[in-house]
């Protein structure tokens, strides 16, 4: 039995562990990755010799500092890398470490499981050579390789310009950066974005960096298709003026912002509420990150906020744990952290409006587009199932009827688009929440049946 378990060794989990260790506690810190750092501050294998200063740009200092802090922390925690939490059952975690199944009971659980890309399908998105934007970054930072030599970046996210710059710095040609949100809609959110002026300036600088080297950057595009015979050869778009444009490329990185990885919170019995800005169901938390007694949520895994908000919210959640253990806390410090988290999350809420999830484009997808690639379910299959009206039309019912979201990814990839197709079929009303199911990621059947 562990007193405190933290899932996630990114900025949120590391910051939380530091606060707990400073009070003499020794939390278990679990991460499926081989090295700590999480997604944004992902650390490549030492023998890759990547120039991380160049790759991380203005964030290189923070990146190096987090990894130094983790090395200091490491002897004080029970650190379990390469360990996947694939299910939660009461106060018991089901783990898979290097292929070996294990269970671990806990008193208090802090989930700092980060985020993943939100994907909007389009014709041809299942062709080899189409990656998520995050996948394109993981290829670079984790394996030191590029997804293609001439890459098109498509979606609606400030990370499009950042990733394009990282790719250009590492030798790729950039075919186009194409954003589905019109420029005017971005400008209208400026007041909310001024909540974090330094981050805003950094974003503008990244966009400027692309324009300075002559990269085409389009706003307000409508994706038409990824084209190619057997693999990506071009990206076809309609620009804001309605003209069809074809960009030759050998890879496409798709990024429509991030969505919190909430499946573990769901399995740990957190309550959820719909957030209309993000168009996602998110776990309910109090001001310090408590979801229910004994369950704490921090970082991008509960609200997208960026690395600084992840650190501050991880620190806050650790203070919540200490408070609940009866240890008095520095109230002024806790209030300051809570204000910081609120401000940074308000900035991200502004970003969610500036780089909007393209609901209308998804609702207008043609029947032939593949929606769920794990189970090979098309948009038309979903619409046909809804037309049968065999019960209430909501996402879990549609999943049961079509198997959309029932495959290897458990709806983590197709879920948000499925929600929009179902919502459109209900006249725009929300479609309900796709419930999390174990295993949250694919595991061998033998491992599920034989915990040590
Ligand atoms: C792919 C990707 C790339 C990004 N790149 C950038 C970037 O270049 N610049 C930038 O500013 N921001 C980037 N971000 C955003 C940035 O990662 C976050 O703002 C920040 O890292 C959030 O910190 P966190 O601690 O909340 O989560 P993370 O840093 O994501 O850490 C979460 C950790 O939890 C672990 N985990 C999750 N689920 C499980 C499980 N079931 N079992 C075990 N371990 C688990 C993960 O392995 C991960 O290490 C990126 C995000 C993603 C998803």
Image (cartoon, grey):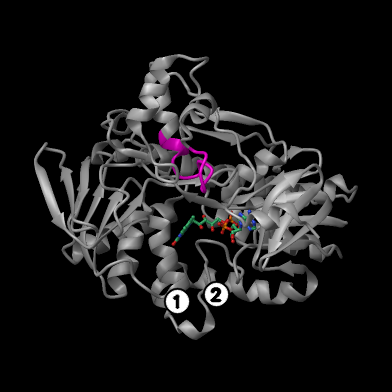
Q: Which residues are magenta?
A: 405-417
Image coords of residue 352 (percent x, y): 42, 40
Count of labels shown? 2
- Image quadrant assignment for residue 225: top left
Report how far apart the C-alphas of labels 2 and 1 lie in the structure.
Answer: 9 Å
150 left or right of 105 in image: left
* Horizontal side, residue 35 vs residue 405: left or right: right
- Examine the rendered structure and indicate whether residue 103 appears above or below residue 220: below
Give left or right: position of 300 versus 338: left
- Look at the picture and state if 240 lies above or below 212: above
Query: How far across and how far down the image is residue 6, in percent?
Result: 73, 56
- Residue 149 is drawn in which quadrant? bottom left
Picture coordinates of residue 277, whole percent (x, y): 46, 32
Residue at numbered disc 1: 52
Is residue 123 visible from the viewing direction of this image?
Answer: yes
Q: Which residue is mark 2?
A: 64
């Amino acid at each position: 039995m562990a007193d405190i378990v933290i899932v996630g060794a990114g900025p949120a989990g590391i910051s939380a562990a530091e606060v707990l260790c400073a009070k003499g506690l020794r939390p278990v810190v679990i991460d499926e990755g081989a090295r700590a750092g999480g997604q944004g501050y992902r650390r490549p294998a030492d023998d890759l010799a990547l120039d991380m200063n160049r790759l991380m740009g203005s964030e290189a200092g923070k990146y190096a500092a987090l990894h130094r802090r983790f090395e200091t922390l490491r002897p004080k925690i029970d650190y379990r890398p390469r360990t996947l939490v694939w299910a939660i059952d009461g106060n018991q975690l089901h783990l898979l470490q290097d292929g070996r199944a294990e269970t671990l009971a806990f008193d208090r659980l802090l989930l700092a499981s980060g985020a993943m890309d939100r994907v909007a399908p389009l014709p041809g998105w299942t062709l080899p050579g189409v990656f998520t934007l995050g996948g394109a970054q993981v290829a670079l930072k984790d394996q030191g390789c590029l997804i293609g030599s001439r890459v098109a970046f498509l979606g609606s996210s400030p990370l499009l310009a950042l990733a394009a710059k990282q790719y250009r710095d590492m030798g790729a040609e950039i075919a186009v950066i194409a954003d589905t949100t019109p420029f005017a809609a971005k400008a209208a959110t400026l007041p909310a974005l001024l909540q974090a002026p330094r981050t805003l300036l950094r974003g503008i600088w990244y966009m400027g960096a692309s324009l300075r080297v002559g990269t085409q950057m389009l706003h307000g595009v409508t994706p038409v298709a990824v084209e190619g015979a057997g693999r990506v050869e071009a990206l076809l778009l309609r620009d804001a003026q309605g003209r069809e444009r074809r960009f030759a490329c050998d890879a496409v990185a798709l990024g429509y912002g991030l969505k919190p990885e909430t499946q573990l919170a769901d399995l740990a019995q957190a309550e959820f509420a719909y957030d209309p800005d993000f168009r996602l169901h998110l776990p309910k938390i109090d001001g310090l990150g408590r979801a229910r007694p004994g369950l704490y949520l921090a970082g991008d895994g509960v609200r997208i906020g960026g690395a600084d908000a992840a650190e501050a919210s991880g620190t806050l959640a650790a203070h919540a744990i200490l408070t609940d253990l009866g240890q008095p806390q520095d109230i002024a410090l806790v209030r300051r952290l809570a204000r910081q988290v609120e401000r940074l999350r308000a900035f991200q809420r502004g970003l969610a409006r500036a780089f909007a999830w393209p609901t209308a484009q998804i609702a207008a997808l043609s029947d032939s587009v593949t929606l769920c690639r794990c189970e090979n379910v098309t948009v038309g299959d979903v619409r046909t199932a809804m037309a049968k009206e065999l019960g209430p039309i909501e996402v879990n019912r549609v999943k049961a009827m079509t198997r959309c979201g029932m495959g290897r990814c458990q709806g983590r990839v197709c879920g948000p688009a499925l929600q929009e197709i179902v919502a459109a079929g209900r006249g725009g009303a929300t479609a309900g929440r796709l419930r999390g199911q174990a295993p949250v990621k694919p595991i061998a059947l033998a491992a599920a049946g034989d915990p040590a």
